[in-house]
Image: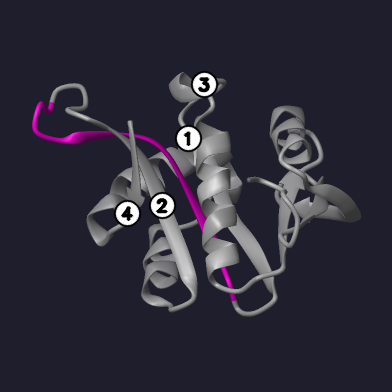
Amino acid sequence: MEIRPMRWWDVAAVHRLERELFGPTAWSAETFWGELAHPGRTYLVAVEPGGPGDPGGEELLGYGGVVVPGADADVQTLGVAPGAQRRGLGRALLRRLVAAARDGGATHLLLEVRADNEPAQALYLAEGFRRIARRARYYQPGDVDALVLRADLRGSAGG
């Protein structure tokens, strides 16, 4: 498995996985294109070389992105293919996003997570994030609350 920068040719596969993972709240392909075009953003993909049916290609296992506009960075997205979950890939991607935020000069990293996504919450809390707020009915459709989490990057969170 390899984690590398997301490129334009990854957008179609990332968008397919995004739709599988997040359904009606999934980002559009255009959103991913726009994110890749902006400075101060780091998007990564986790791939397995020689994916099924394409010995010269790659199988997308996960992806993530962070924006670093200043001292407060924000994880924009993080997703892992269902067949690759619970193997440490989400943690590996998160740690690379934390490193990118630190490298960009951020001192804090924020993210939103669905209040009903207990596995993701457990990962974030284990990596040093702390809950700071709740956003009622943030994820639509579905009226699912978001928990806002924050990590202090000046210490050892995510490291």
Q: Amino acid at mark 3?
A: Arg
Left or right: where 131 falls relative to 118: right
Give the residue at mark 2. 44
State whether residue 131 is above or below residue 102. Answer: above
Give the residue at mark 1. 20
Between marks 3 and 2, how big is the CA–CA gap?
A: 18 Å
State whether residue 41 is above or below residue 77. Answer: below
Between marks 1 and 3, how big is the CA–CA gap?
A: 19 Å
Span shown in magenta: 54-68
Give the residue at mark 3. 87
Mark 3 element type:
loop
Label pair 1/3, CB-CB below 8 angstroms: no
Give the residue at mark 4. 11
- Numbered disc in front, either 1 or 3: 3
Q: Amino acid at mark 2?
A: Leu
Q: Amino acid at mark 1?
A: Glu
